Amino acid sequence: MDIRACSAVSAILVLCSQSAWSGGFYITELGTPGSLGTAGSANPTNTLTADSAWTNPAAMTGVEQDHGLVGVQAIIPVNKFDSSIAEGGGGDGGNAGFISAVPSHFLTTHLTEDISVGFSVVGMMGGGLDYGKNFVGRYGAYRAVLAGLAFSPSVGYKINDDFSVGMGVSVVQTTFDEDIAVRQPGFSDGRVSINQIDDWGITTFYGLTYQATEKLMVGVVYRPEWDVDLEGDVSFANFVGVTPTADEVEVEWDNPQLLQVGFRYALNDMYTLFMDADWEDWSEFSDNTLSFEGGLINPIVKLDRNWKDTYHVGFGVLRKWGDHRVSTGIAYDSSPVNDSDRTIDLPVDEQLKLAAAYGWKGDSLDFAFGATFMYLGEGEVDQTAQGVRFKGEFDTNYVVFAGGTLLYEF
């Protein structure tokens, strides 16, 4: 592998997109009314529907009726970069975001009066940006797509009328694509493509709920740190002279631990208030490693992104009357990276969320739909990749999560 390919490899190092989320790229919006409609603030104290199998397994013990919850969520990003410096020429790429869909499937049932079990299938992380091959920042990256799908059995145990605990195990399939241009002065760009590399990993999650008073419930959720080790194909195209022969790549990073605390207060028979806050250990994600195999020279590249831990705070309200439910919410997530360290492949910034949902309760079949609007900050980037500097920010930068669910009691 020659020096041009090595410089490209140094610029590739991982990940996805800024259409990913929750401080970094975890998705807290699950396509369910309690999650979408309260900006996630109801998640830790959710004893209302089967998505508690994922949001807090201890809360399953408080779900009154065995049921399944089936839904889908569309992720609709609008991410438009506006460059002020572009030493390598090129364009701003238009709307780099593209629409995707993720499942929201949940099931919970009571085995005994004290033991409940559940199962969930959720898109827990992901997103994508595609700026196009002529993007001003193409030597950093011009396309990156991440997806993480979790299959999770869980169990909750009611210790007494006020206190419950729970845990779950997630089998997670993570996939990642990335494309980067290789600078070749006097010639057209070369291309390096990481093609659908993937990993199957296992992680756990834990929860508890405490009914502090008749009106106040407290919920706590902990998700530990876990590692991702993706492997798959890499290809090289349009190189002048010697083309690298490596054909496999391995990408590694650690997903951060998360500690979340939530409160639910029944103001009266009509209104319920929610509040949640969390800490996410994104500094552990900061070290990324990429290694090549199958070539004459197989470099191992390490990158420190200088990420830092984040915090989140959210508030929501649920209004019930008759068979109708309406919820609204607002939340804020801090940025995991300073402006000076932000890169174009993962230009995450602070986030502000506004949410609303509507649900209707029938005899055995309920439906709900909702949406969260998430403002993703300016995402300022000032990066030098392969000796070429580009600078700018996102003048339009948001994502809409829109989803619907059907609930069937059995």
Image (cartoon, rainbow, N blue to C red):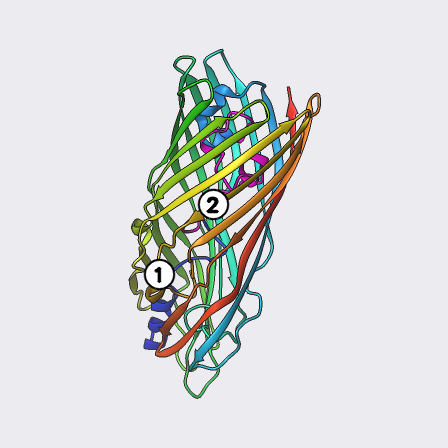
What is the x, y in percent for residue 271?
56, 28
* Residue 373 in sight here: yes
Measured in 3D between alpha carbons, the distance from the residue under mark 2 to the one under mark 1, in whole angstroms, is: 43 Å
The answer to whether the residues at label 2 and label 1 have Cβ atoms under 8 Å apart is no
| For residue 100, above or below residue 58 | below
Residue in the picture at 34% in, 53% down: 252
- Of mark 2 and mark 1, the one earlier in the sequence is 1
Q: Percent x, y for residue 19?
A: 50, 55
Q: Is residue 29 magenta?
A: yes
Q: Considering the numbered disc 2 on the image, is that residue within a helix, a strand or a loop? A: strand
- Where residue 243 sits in the image (x, y, percent)? 41, 75
- Given residues 223 and 209, the one toward you in this image is 209
**Residue type, label 2:** Ala
The magenta stretch is: 22-51
- The residue wearing badge 2 is 331
Q: Residue at x 43, y 24 (%)?
A: 217
Considering the whole magenta stretch, tell me its main secondary structure.
Answer: loop
Mark 2 or 1: the one toward you:
2
Q: Which mark is residue 78?
A: none
Under mark 1, the amino acid is Glu
Residue 293, disc:
1
